[in-house]
């Protein structure tokens, strides 16, 4: 594990956001495990929707449908009515289709196998990685737009993100630890939200500024770039 990864994990211990689908770092130390059902629902809701909007929907969703079995028996019209306000209704339709497959073919459980996850309705590469990492603590390199931004800044990647995907993945591989993968993925999400923000990164408060190449060269507000600089 790199020093930067260690620092980010310790930062997470102190600064993790409290989210209803999440096990806090303190609970995690005590051996509590995340509920894969909640992780799955949250990841689907968080596609194209902000955390703040998702929280109340998530809470009432898991109150109403508290397990895969129950969700698999819901009507599509009921789920769609619930989904009003979240938008992107294909997610809701796929969620129900997925619950039915999980109930019939997977014994009402979320599988931790990548291929099986990818075969399920509504679960693509990012969601499969996030579920494996957060719910099962498997080593996955979970990269979304926030992680791309952090990596571009840390490693001073000066080409636009679209042209740097391979390079970003290579750098992410160095950064992601082999252990504590779920906590690390969530640490990056929180760090992106609270410190390495899109427009105004809080570099003066940043615990990893000494290893940030963009900060070193005063490029943190320019990177990620839209054009090569
Ligand atoms: Fe992000 Fe600034 Fe920290 Fe670099 S120093 S990782 S740009 S917050």
Image (cartoon, helix red, strand yellow):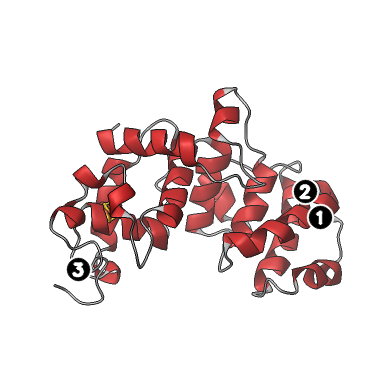
Which x, y percent locates residue 151? 29, 54
Whole-percent x, y for residue 103 in the image: 78, 48
Residue that badge 1 annotates: 72
Q: Which of 165 and 202 is in front in this view?
A: 202
How far is mark 2 from mark 1, CA to CA?
6 Å
Quadrant hosting residue 10:
top left
* Sooner in the amino-acid sequence: mark 3 or mark 2: 2
Between circles 3 and 2, the one closer to the viewer is 3
Dot 2: few (<14), some (14–19), or many (≥20) neighbours within 10 Å? many
| Residue beneath disc 3 | 159
Mark count: 3
**Residue at x-position 25% and y-position 49%:** 171
> Going by the image, does 2 lie left or right of 32?
left
Left or right: 203 in relation to 42: left
Left-right relation of 221 to 188: left
* Secondary structure of the residue carrying numbered label 1: helix
Q: Residue at x 71, y 74 (%)?
A: 85
Find numbered disc 3 in the image and state the secondary structure of the residue it sits on.
loop
Q: In which quarter of the image is the N terminus?
A: top left
Q: Residue 84 is drawn in which quadrant?
A: bottom right
- Judged by depth in the image, the label closer to the viewer, 3 or 1, is 3
Toward the viewer: 151 or 67?
Answer: 151
Asked if labels 1 and 2 touch by Cβ distance under 8 angstroms, the answer is: yes
Q: Residue 68 carries which label?
A: 2
Residue found 28% across the figure and 51% down from its top = 204
Q: In this view, does 32 lie above or below 156?
A: above
* Alpha carbons under labels 3 and 2: distance apart: 43 Å
Q: Are marks 3 and 1 in contact (CB under 8 Å)?
A: no
Work out whether 173 lies above or below 41: above
The percent coordinates of residue 41 (x first, y second) are 67, 54
């Amino acid at each position: 594990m790199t020093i930067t990864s260690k620092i980010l994990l310790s930062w997470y211990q102190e600064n993790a956001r409290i989210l209803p689908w999440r096990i806090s770092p303190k609970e995690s130390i005590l051996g509590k495990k995340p509920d894969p059902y909640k992780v799955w629902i949250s990841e689907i809701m968080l596609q194209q929707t902000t955390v703040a909007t998702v929280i109340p929907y998530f809470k009432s969703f898991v109150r109403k449908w508290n397990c895969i079995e129950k969700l698999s028996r819901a009507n599509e019209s009921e789920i769609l009515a619930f989904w009003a306000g979240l938008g992107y209704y294909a997610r809701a339709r796929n969620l129900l289709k997925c619950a039915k497959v999980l109930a019939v073919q997977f014994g009402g459980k979320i599988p931790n196998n990548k291929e099986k996850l990818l075969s399920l309705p509504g679960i693509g590469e990012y969601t499969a990685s996030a579920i494996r990492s957060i719910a099962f603590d498997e080593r996955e390199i979970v990269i979304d737009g926030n992680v791309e931004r952090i990596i571009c800044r840390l490693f001073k990647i000066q080409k636009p993100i679209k042209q740097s995907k391979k390079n970003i993945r290579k750098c992410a591989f160095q950064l992601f630890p082999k252990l504590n993968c779920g906590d690390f993925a969530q640490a990056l999400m929180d760090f992106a939200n609270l410190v390495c923000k899109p427009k105004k990164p809080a570099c003066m408060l940043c615990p990893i500024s000494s290893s940030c190449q963009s900060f070193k060269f005063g490029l943190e507000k320019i990177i990620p770039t839209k054009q090569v600089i």
